[in-house]
Image (cartoon, rainbow, N blue to C red):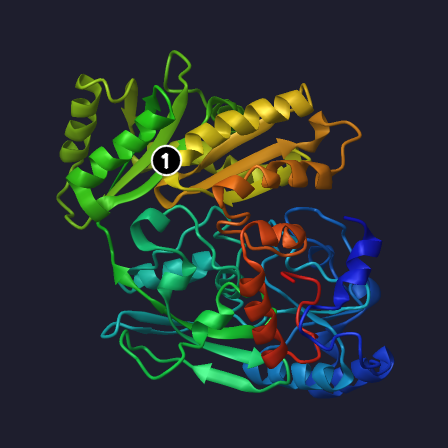
Amino acid sequence: MTDNSRENSGTNSGTHSGTHSAAPLAATLDALRAALGDDAVRVGAEIGERALTDWTRHDPTRPAALLLPRSTEEVSRALAICHAAHQPVVPQGGMTGLAGGAIARATDIALSLERLSGVEEVDAASATLTVRAGTTLQAAQEAAAEAGFELALDLGARGSCQIGGNLATNAGGNRVVQSGTARDQVLGLEVVLANGDVLTSLGKMVKNNTGYDLKHWFIGSEGTLGIITRAVLRLHPRRAARHTALVALDGYDGAVNLLRRLSTRFGNDIGAFEIMWPDFYDFGVKLTGTRSPFADPHPLYALIEHAGFDSGDDGERFAAALTDALDAGAIRDAVIAQSVADARALWAIRECTAEFPVRLDAINFDVSLPIGEIGAFVDRCRAALDRQWPGNVAYFFGHIGDSNLHVTVDGHSLAGVEHHAVYAFVYEMLRPLRGSVSAEHGIGLLKREFLPISRSATELAAMAAIKHALDPHGILNPGKLF
């Protein structure tokens, strides 16, 4: 996608964006400085490199200004000013996104939540954590652990990604099979609307059947309907025992059968079930500098976590289940981590994707398909890529328990081929399967033209109507999603 196409994308379906003349930028910046203070408004070289693009490294662009509010009140003042001036605003969090959802245009003002951070409260009685949107996921996890609880959401980018961004994109992560997506961790939200109004719904109740559940409009909306500033998150009892195994399999059908076998035996104690095809597994072993625990290569690998509440669980039941699977021919081999260090080494192979932005010219796909279709789709996708671009390098991996497949194609292996051509080629393969072009990374800039593959015209019209109702001038994250 060219810069020109991005500049032309500011008019959103169902909004009045572009139909009113914006106030001069200089006057808007003067008003923002008066409201927030000079140190909260940066321009030009004062704007750090982190604000220019996300982990996709797509079209790095310096925004017209970067705002650094310290409170909900300052976010409110900033949006009221920008709304009156019809000035586009792009919310930014940890900038770990993979869909271009936080990239600003040169005419946009970026609004970073990094100063709006900190855990405000852990309520043991209601098992909730109230947190500001700029708090990193890891900091929130650690606060929950210190109070004897567990925040179920977990991503490889936990040390950099922020809670606001996790919720705005409805992040998934490693433990969705056990605890659900980011959406399932939320009881209440505080959101600043486009005009500066603050919508506060920070309830801690599980049951609250009083009309529309407004928080769900903003979770997964990618900052196009409002800016999340605070959240009340569900906490869970801390799982006292975790056991990790790397399993070698005959193929995809074997992985599904093993997942069902273990789920039948352990229920919700299966905390993660990650699968890796050999291309990804071998690359992960190489990137992490480790040695594969298996003497021979295998057609498929599964990284499995058993997480229970019994602190006395020494892993014998989990080991016995894998032994039974081995004896029944359901798996080829298995290695069980004997220490925390062993478990981290195994997880490092799966989480090597953090190195993709610097090691590859990564063309990322985050798709969702019926679980039974994923294996055949991988075979078809790999064969189709090989026919279209012989010599291409692609990596396949995913969380099959929640129907999520990831594919990363290295653009370095596709000399002269534009990323857009690869996106169009792979996404079109989803159409007959009614698959989703985004399982957990959002739509952003990179997937918006492919959204009709997964959403009907009626659905898109309803989404545009909601956008127009909450952001009539189309100032919030223009060009994203729509």
Q: Secondary structure at mark 1?
A: helix
Q: Residue at x 84, y 55 (%)?
A: 4
Rendered view: 176 above or below 205: above
In depth, the one of 217 and 287 nearer the eye is: 217
Figure quadrant of the C terminus: bottom right
Q: Position of residue 414 (x, y in %)?
A: 72, 27
Instruction: Give left or right: position of 288 versus 332.
Output: right
Q: In the rendered picture of this protein, how many numbered marks are placed on residues?
A: 1
Residue 54, percent across and down?
Answer: 66, 52
Picture quadrant where residue 89 is located: bottom right
Q: Is residue 65 left or right of residue 139?
A: right
Q: Disc 1 designates what residue?
A: 372
Please state which of residues 304 and 384 is positioned toward the viewer in this rendering. Answer: 384
Mark 1 neighbour class, 10 Å CA radius: few under 14, some 14 to 19, many 20 or more: few
Q: Residue at x 22, y 75 (%)?
A: 125
- Does 153 sit above or below residue 132? above
Please tell me which residue lies in front, 107 or 446. Answer: 446
Q: Please name the amino acid that badge 1 sits on.
A: Gly
In this rendering, position of residue 346 left or right of residue 336: right
Q: Residue at x 31, y 54 (%)?
A: 179
Q: In which image quadrant can residue 408 be found?
A: top right
- Residue 352: % across, % down: 51, 35
- Residue 335, quarter of the rendered image: top left
Q: Is residue 459 above or below residue 15?
A: above
| Residue 37 appears in the figure | no
Q: Nearer the viewer, residue 101 or 402?
A: 402
Q: Is residue 218 visible?
A: yes
Name, please, the residue furthest toward the top: 296
> In the rendering, at what x and y percent does residue 155 appear?
45, 49
